[in-house]
Amino acid sequence: MLVTGGAGYIGSTAVAILLDAGFHVSVLDDLSTGHADSVDSRARLIEGSLLDKDAIRRAIAGCDSVLHFAGKSLVGESVEMPALYMQVNVEGSTNLLDVMKEVGVNQIVFSSSAATYGEPREAILTEESETQPTNPYGESKLKVDQLLSERAVKDGIAALSLRYFNVAGAFKGSRGWLTERHNPETHLIPNVLKASDSHPVTVFGIDWPTADGTCIRDYIHVIDLIDAHIKALKILKNGTHEIINLGSGEGYSVRQVIDTASDVMGRKVPTRDAQRRAGDPAVLVASIEKAQSLLNWKPTKNLSEMISDVYSSTR
Ligand code: UDP
């Protein structure tokens, strides 16, 4: 199995869980945001970029399927650097699919995103909801979803896009904790847990059209997310491209996340109210009916467990 982006937060967690489940794993990662020491030593690590087809060829040798996590993934950064997002995410994925065709690998599970939907026009997003991304990150993920649909028809590949909502939590494997290690860290939960009186966590917008004025997101534990990938591998079908939302099906506001973290840590999280962040939609909550029925999967961990695992991983 080839895992692209296997040195990142989600990818490295997948690698560890796959190895424990008995898979042979090859990792392709350019280490631009990932960390070599996050990659379980039982995996083969090829340091290289999706923009380099030779690196992809080296990494895919001996593999029969691909979990494609690699990519740029920050909404704010994508607004600043849209071309980079198109290059790495779209051109990189095109290269990967080209090499897969060349070497006869036809199974792929892709990390897509709820950002493909943009500002929701309904409370709960289903896979049928209109896609109208509000930022270049979401646009790039949508383009790859469209590319997979085309290649399924044209080349007969078996493809599945998992549209992640907000992935959180940490995984404690046989070799210690795997957790988010971004620099700078932009994600809410790690920032909430790091907040101090001198560096309070910033709340991006308190005037959103939600009950408490802060953005609502659907958080899913990384362990539940990877479990869904393993189940996804089993339902791949040649010539088809499925799209499946992955979240917990429940929305929490930024304030609710902060309050839950205060409960987990037993101290009040210092906060600072600020302007809205560019590119953010107000509410993103998944319908997970399709994931439940097609994958025979359900989330098992709640927000408090996600926060508490991240908290444990940092101590
Ligand atoms: N957010 C925040 N302060 C932070 C980081 C994030 O208020 O330090 C908000 C952000 O505006 C969004 C939500 O928390 O509404 C989740 O953001 P995150 O960056 O974790 O994930 P995203 O939804 O962008 O993928």
Image (tube, rainbow, N blue to C red):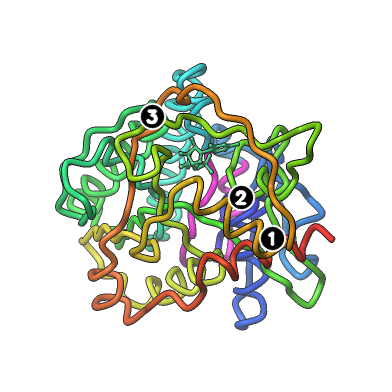
Residue 44 location, x and y as percent?
A: 72, 61
Q: CA distance from mark 3 to mark 2?
A: 20 Å
Query: Is residue 57 located in the magenta-colored stretch of the structure?
Result: yes
Displayed quadrant of residue 159: bottom left
The residue at which mark 2 appears reads as 189
Decide which of tag 3 and tag 1 comes sooner along the chain.
3
Label 1 sits on residue: 310
The answer to whether the residues at label 3 and label 1 have Cβ atoms under 8 Å apart is no
Q: Which residue is at the front of the view, 251 or 313?
A: 251
Residue 186, above or below 276: below
Does the closest atom of ligand 1 sit within 8 Å of the Cβ of label 2?
yes
Q: Position of residue 12 (x, y in %)?
A: 66, 59
Alpha carbon separation for disc pair 3 and 1: 28 Å
- The span picked out in magenta is 55-71
In the rendered structure, are the residues bearing label 1 and label 2 in contact, judged by CB atoms less than 8 Å apart? Answer: yes
Mark 3: which secondary structure? loop
Q: What is the crowding at mark 3: few (fewer than 14 residues within 10 Å), some, or many (at least 20)?
A: some
Number of residues whose C-alpha sits closer than 10 Å to that of mark 1, classed few (under 14), some (14–19) or many (20 or more)? many
**Circle 2 sits in a helix, a strand or a loop, which is it?**
helix
Q: Which residue corresponds to the image point at 69% horizontal and 60% vertical from the top-left? A: 310
Residue at x-position 81% and y-position 69%: 176
Q: Which residue is mark 3?
A: 207
